[in-house]
């Protein structure tokens, strides 16, 4: 599984981080590196074969 997470100064940590621009109330970039780090850790626990960009 490949996964790209996006971070932007205009992002929101309530979003899913799966898009570079906010698309709706759920999809868009994170605001902080810490939120992206936490998401990577959670995904690694679920998908041990995952790689991240």
Image: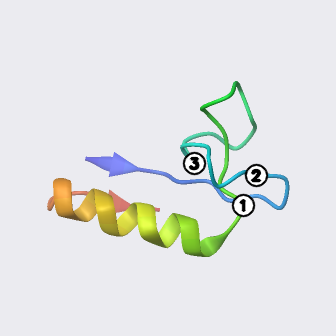
Real-space Cα separation, disc 2 to disc 3, in angstroms: 8 Å
**Upstream in the sequence, badge 2 or badge 1?**
2
**Label 1 belongs to which residue?**
31
**Label 2 belongs to which residue?**
11
Across and down, in percent, residue 23 comes to 71, 27
Across and down, in percent, residue 49 comes to 15, 58
The residue that appears at 24% across and 57% down in the rendered structure is 50
Check the image and tell me how it is coloured: rainbow
Residue 29 can be seen in this image? yes
Whether the residues at callouts 1 and 3 have beta carbons within 8 Å, the answer is no
In what element is the residue under mark 2? loop
Q: Residues within 10 Å of mark 1 (few under 14, many from 20)?
A: some
In what element is the residue under mark 1? loop
**Label 3 belongs to which residue?**
17
Across and down, in percent, residue 19 comes to 62, 39
Whether the residues at callouts 2 and 3 have beta carbons within 8 Å, the answer is yes
Across and down, in percent, residue 16 comes to 54, 43
Q: Residues within 10 Å of mark 2 (few under 14, many from 20)?
A: some
**Upstream in the sequence, badge 2 or badge 3?**
2
- Vertical position of residue 14 compared to residue 52: above or below: above
Whether the residues at callouts 2 and 1 have beta carbons within 8 Å, the answer is yes
Image-quadrant location for residue 20: top right
Real-space Cα separation, disc 2 to disc 1, in angstroms: 4 Å
């Amino acid at each position: 599984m490949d996964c790209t997470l996006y971070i932007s100064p205009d992002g929101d940590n309530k979003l899913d981080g799966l898009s570079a621009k906010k698309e709706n109330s759920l999809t868009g970039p994170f605001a902080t590196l810490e939120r992206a780090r936490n998401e990577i850790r959670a995904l690694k626990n679920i998908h041990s074969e995952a790689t991240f960009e």
